[in-house]
Structures are given as structure tokens and as C-alpha cells.
Image: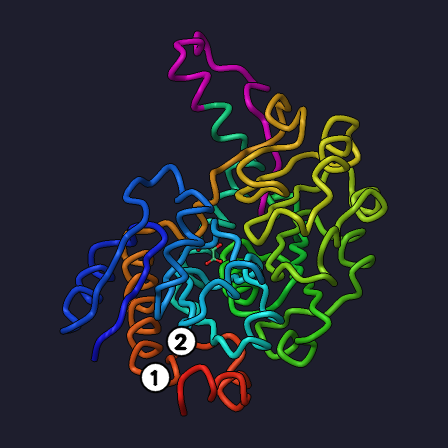
Amino acid sequence: MTGRIVVSRRIPEVGMSLLAAQPGVEVEVLEDAQDRGPARSRLLDAVATADVLLCLLTEAVDRELLSAGRRLRGVSQMAVGVDNVDMAAATELGIPVGHTPGVLTETTADLAWALLLATARRIPQAHRYQVEGRYRIWGPELFTGADVGSGGSGRRKVLGIVGFGRIGQAVARRSVGFDMEVLAHDPRNRDRVEAVLGVRWAPLDHLLSEADFVSLHTPLTPETHHLLGEEELRTMKSTAILVNTARGPVVDEAALVRALREGWIAGAGLDVYEDEPRMAPGLVDLPNVVLLPHVGSASIDTRDRMATMAAHNAVAFLQGERAPHTVDPGVYDTPAYRERTGG
Ligand code: DGY
């Protein structure tokens, strides 16, 4: 096997070693740093002579880039979400796109729960207070927050899950210990909802008006862009907490800032942003938010598994084979793919 794999940014060593172990394969890493991506011009130049592009969700894999990759046999992204890839253009050009589903489900569900608990119980705020040496005396109202379970009140709290794919279901499973009532909304997965742990399917407006906690787990598509805007945020309880570990543009972030400032809802735990890494003006100054830098899948083991999977997808593309995890497998049956791969 010969060929050239362009890696837009260095991935964990286990994935790099897997690529390096392929005899006759040239691997070029465009950026080694963790805190910046390659210049667009560099990416465009490199992709022109690449057989496979292995990239991250920070790269815009748009029609221009895909068209520049005249030799490309596949794009392997180290992420499950591919909203940064123009999938229509990829399929039209006969370029299969690989991704990393499944391996990050549990880790991301853990983080959604960590954010939910941290926001409800104001953990980062209390931590800051403690490390700044401001704790002088125990106080009955010092950092009081919201109960996640019934908290002895006898009222079961309601968890609303929007998007009931793998991660949404994993979030539901974790609610058992908190004895919550779980509502889920997912237009594509209604049958799956009722098969999990007594979770009840609900229309979005009903879920939003009933839930004490709303957790988002939907992919970003034209249908889910701004799924939660001003009207939906106003539908939520004033005591509710919103958690977003999915994609930023699912929420109208400017409306969310108003909602948090004006008390339409009580708090938000966010791992993703509408115009990442930037945040909507005012978000960072709010006292009722917990903000993380897109670390949903960031456990060492999971990132290793993602890197391994992305490398396997890349090697399969280079060999002219179907990748183990292709976003749109229909591409393999297109004349554009056959022409591109000489098949
Ligand atoms: C993904 O994979 O889509 C996440 O956002 C990063 O793990």
C-alpha cells in the first residue's frame, strides 16, 4: 500500500502510531499544537496531494476543500459529529467520510451529568470561593442550589432529554440513581424512547414546560439549528437548568443570555457554543452558568479510542476499502466514488 495521509492536527499517539506502522504510507501532520489549527491555505495546499485527510471538528471541510482534494479517497474525522463537513458535497464528489460513533457515548453522558450537577449545586462557584480564601464561616444560605433528585421533598424531578440517540439514552440510564422522571423528545427515535427504562416520549413544548433539567443530545442539522430559541426558552420553568453537550448552534445563544439574565430559566451548563470558541456577549459574566471548553469526550481512554477508530477509517480509505464507520455508506455505490477510486 502506498499513499499520503494528511493529518490536520496531531491526534493521540495510539492513532499516530497506527498510521506510521503502515508500510509505504507517508503521513504529514499539519499542526502539532493543541491550541491552534492549521492555516486554511496550508490545509488547501496539503489536501491537493492527499489520498486521505484525517481531520478534527475544528476544520471546515467544505466544498472548496473537498474539491481541492482531487485524489482524496476519504475523509476520516476524529469525532462523531460531522456538522463541519459538507456531507452533500462529499457524497456528490464520491468522497466517503468516516467518523467515530459509539466510543464516546458513555464519556459524554458522564460529562452531561457532571455539568448538570455542577450547575445545579454551583460547584465551580463554591470552589472559586474556597480557593480564594473567602470561606470564613458556615452559612445556612451559602451556595444553596437546586436538588437533582427529590432531595427529601417527595417530588421526583423531571429530566428532559432532547435527542435520544446513543448519548441521550446513556444520560437517561444515569438518572436511575436520582429517581427522576424522564421525558425524551426525538422525532426520529420515538420507538426507542419507550423501550428505555420507562422513559416517556414527549412533544418538545411539553418536555420544555415540564422539565427541571433539559439536556441536549441532538446532532446539529438544518432542522435542529436554534431548536431552542427565545420562544422555547420562555416555555421552560424559571427554576429549570439547561445543559448542552451537543452542538452550540442548537441553542440561540443570544436568547440564552437574555433568558439567564432575566430569569426565564435558572441556569445553564454549557460545553459547546454557537460560534465556538467565542461566546455570546455577556455569557461569561453571568453568575448562573458553568462553562467548559468542549470537553465532552475528553477522557484519556476515550480520546485514544477515537484516535484508533479514526486511524482505522483512514487506513481503510487508503486501501480503497469501505471504512468501518462511514457516515453515508451510500457513497460507495455512486459512480463518483467508483471513478475516484478506479473501482
Ligand atoms: C464529537 O465527537 O462530535 C464531539 O463533539 C467531540 O468528541
Magenta highlight on residue 140: yes
Residue 82 placement (x, y as % from top left): 53, 62
Q: Quick check: marks 1 and 2 in contact, CB under 8 Å?
A: yes
Foreground: 76 or 106?
A: 76
Residue 101 visible in the displayed image: no
Number of on-image labels: 2
258 horizontally vs 70: left or right: right
Residue 145 visible in the displayed image: yes
Which residues fall within the magenta stretch? 127-148
Amino acid on which disc 2 is placed: Arg
Magenta highlight on residue 179: no
In which image quadrant can residue 5 be found? bottom left
Residue 319 placement (x, y as % from top left): 29, 82
Some atom of ligand 1 lies within 8 Å of the CB belonging to the residue at label 2 = no
Gap between marks 1 and 2 measured at Cα? 7 Å
Amino acid on which disc 1 is placed: Gly
Q: Which residue is mark 2?
A: 73
Q: Which residue is mark 1?
A: 320
> At 75% from the left edge and 54% from the top edge, which residue is drawn?
227
Residue 201 placement (x, y as % from top left): 72, 70
308 horizontally vs 20: left or right: right
